[in-house]
Amino acid sequence: MLLGSTLVMALLPLGILSMVQTWVSLGQVDQAILHGIDGASQAGVSKQIELIQDAQSAARTISYIFSVGMPLDIQSCNSRMKAVVDEMPQATLVTMITTEGEIECASSDEFDKIAAEPALLDLPQKPDLSLTYIPQGPISGKPVIMVGVPVIDAQGRQMGAVALMLIQQAITPAAYQSDYGLWQAVLTATYTSEGVLLAADRPVEEIPALLPANLQLNALGGSVGEPYYSYGTDGQRRIVSITRVADDVNLLAIWEQEHGASAWASRVIPYLLPALTWAAALIAAYIASQRLVVRHVRALARAMTAYMSHRKRETVPGIADSPAEIQRLHGVYAELIAAIEQDEAELENLLVDKDRLLREVHHRSGNSLQIIASVLRMYRRESGDPALRGVLDGLINRVIALSSTHTSLYGLEGRQDVPMDAVLNAVIHRLKEIHGIPIGSARKQFQPITLPAQAAIPLALALAETVSCFFGAKDQMKGGVDVALDVQGQDIRLYVEGPNVPEFQPETTHGLASLPRRMLTQFAGQLRGRVVTRIADNRSMVELTFPRNLH
C-alpha cells in the first residue's frame, strides 16, 4: 500500500501538469479557430460592405450637388440619377426627397411607387448618414438596403435627403481550414437588429436544429465580431459568428467542423500522454498493493467474516510472509477473538442467571397476587355491605388478571423477545374464566409481534385492565369485544372495542370508575406511548399506540 501510494503521489503532479498544459493548449487552439472564423465571416461580407461604401460615396456626391444649390432642371437631375444606377448594377433606385416629402428627382419615372414607400418619407428627418433594410423595394420588388445621406444647405438647414437603394445579396462565407480540421458554414442568414430573419441558405424547418437552444436574434447585438462556441439542440458543437453588414442588417453564420479522424484527434490525442502516464502509475500501484498488502488483508477479512458468521476460526494462509504491520494486525485479531469468546461465555452465564431471576420474579409476583386475592375474598365473605362486596369483586378480578399475566410471562422460559399474541391470548382466556364470559364473546386479531419483557408486561396489564372493564358489564355484551394488535408504520397499536361502560366515558373523571383510565395512562407512559378513548354508536373504543423501537 505504501509503495503504491508513493508511486501515485509521485506521478500525480506530473499528470495534473500535463493535463493542465493540454487544456491550455486546446484553449489557445479554440481561440485561434474563433479568430479565423471571424476573419472568414468578415471576408464573406466584405463585398457587400464595399458595395454599401461605394453607395454611400455616390449618395454623398449627389447630396453635395443639391446642398451647394447647383442649378439642375428636373430632366437633367433624373438623367444624373439614372447614370448612377447604370454605373452601379446593384442599385435599383436613386432619389432625392425634400423635408416636405416631395420627390425632387429620381432614377425611375414611377414617382407614385417611390412616394408610397414609408421608409423614404421618414428619411428627410434623419440628420445623419443611415442604412435601412426594406423587405420589398418600391421599384425592384426585392429586399434592398437603403443608403440615406442628408442634404444640408449653406446655412446648415436640412433641405431633405438622398436615398440610394441596393439589392440585398446572399452572403456565403468561404470555408475555413484550421490546423485540426475544416470548418464550413452550415447556415448563413441575415436578420435585422429587431431579430427579424431576412434570408437564409437553408429551409426554415431545418434552422432550429442548428441554432443554440438559448439563441435570441434580437439580443445578439453585443456578439458582433465575437464568435463563440455553442451546442445546437441536436447536441453538435458549433461556432456562432455575428458580422455586421449594415446598421440594421447582421449576418448570422453557424460553423461546423467536418467529422473525421482529424476532428477526433484534435480533442482526444492531446490527453493520451497524461492518461497513459496515470494508467502506468495505477497499474504499478495495483500490482504492488496486491502483492504486498491486499491479498493478505483479504485473507484476514475472510477469516474475520467466517468467524463472525459461523463462530469458526480459519487459518490465514501466507500470514508469515506478510509485512510486519499485517502480522501485528493478525495478532490483534487473534487476541480479539479470545476476548470475544471469553466475554460471550460470561454473557451467556449472565443471561441464564437473568432468565432464572426473571422467571422467579414473575412466579413470586403471581403467588403474591394470589395471596392478595385470597385476602380480599376473606374480607368479601365477612362483609355484609353489597356495595363494598361489589368493589371487592372488582378488585379481586383485577388482581387475578394481574396474576394471570405474570403467570403467562413465567411460562415463556428463556425467551428474550416475548410473543405478544400468545401472551394476550392467555390473558383474555383467563379473564373469560374469571368473569364467566362464554366462548366467542371476544374476537381477536393479533399480528405476530414480539416485544422485550419490559414492554410486554405493561402492554399485557393494559389489555387486562381494559378487557376487565368490558367483561364486567355482562348485561351489555351482546356486541362482544373486539381486540386487535397490529403494526402501523413505525408504531404498534393495541385496539379494544366493547360495550359502552362508565369507565371510558368522557364525563368519568372522579371516583372508582376513573381508575382504569388512569391506570391505562400509566401503562402507556411506561411504553412511551399514548391512550385515546372515544364513544361511537354506543360502543367504547380504547386505542393504545407506542413506538416499535423502545430502545
Image (spheres, rainbow, N blue to C red):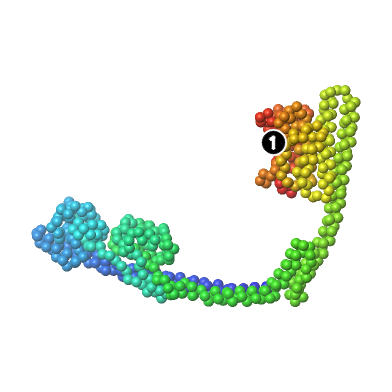
Q: Splitting the image into 4 quarters, where does residue 330 fall? A: bottom right
Name the one closer to the observer, 234 or 242: 234
Vertical comparison of 345 with 332: above or below: above
Instruction: Tell me what residue is drawn at x 44 percent, y 63 percent.
Output: 235
Picture quadrant where residue 538 is located: top right
For the view shown, which residue lies furthest in the top direction?
Answer: 385
Q: On the rendered structure, is 507 left or right of 400?
A: left
Badge 1 marks a residue whose secondary structure is strand
For the point 19% across and 66% down, which residue is it?
Answer: 89
- Vertical arrangement, residue 308 with respect to residue 378, above or below: below
Question: Residue 46: x percent and y percent?
Answer: 28, 68
Left or right: residue 387 versus residue 125 is right
Q: Nearer the viewer, residue 284 or 131?
A: 284
Residue 91 visible somewhere in the drawing: yes
User: Mark 1 = which residue?
Assistant: 532
User: How many numbered circles are shown?
Assistant: 1
Q: Which of the 4 image quarters holds residue 35? A: bottom left
Q: Residue at x 83, y 35 (%)?
A: 399
| Image x and y of residue 246, in percent | 28, 62
The amino acid on which the numbered mark 1 sits, given as a three-letter code, is Val
> x%, y% of residue 273?
53, 76
Task: Where is residue 396? Give x, y as percent.
Answer: 84, 32
Most foreground residue, 403 or 43: 403
Q: Is residue 226 visible?
A: no
User: Dividing the image into 4 quarters, which one contains the N terminus?
Assistant: bottom right
- Density class for disc 1 (Cα within 10 Å; few <14, some 14-19, many ≥20) is some
Residue appearing at x 17%, y 55% in the figure: 114
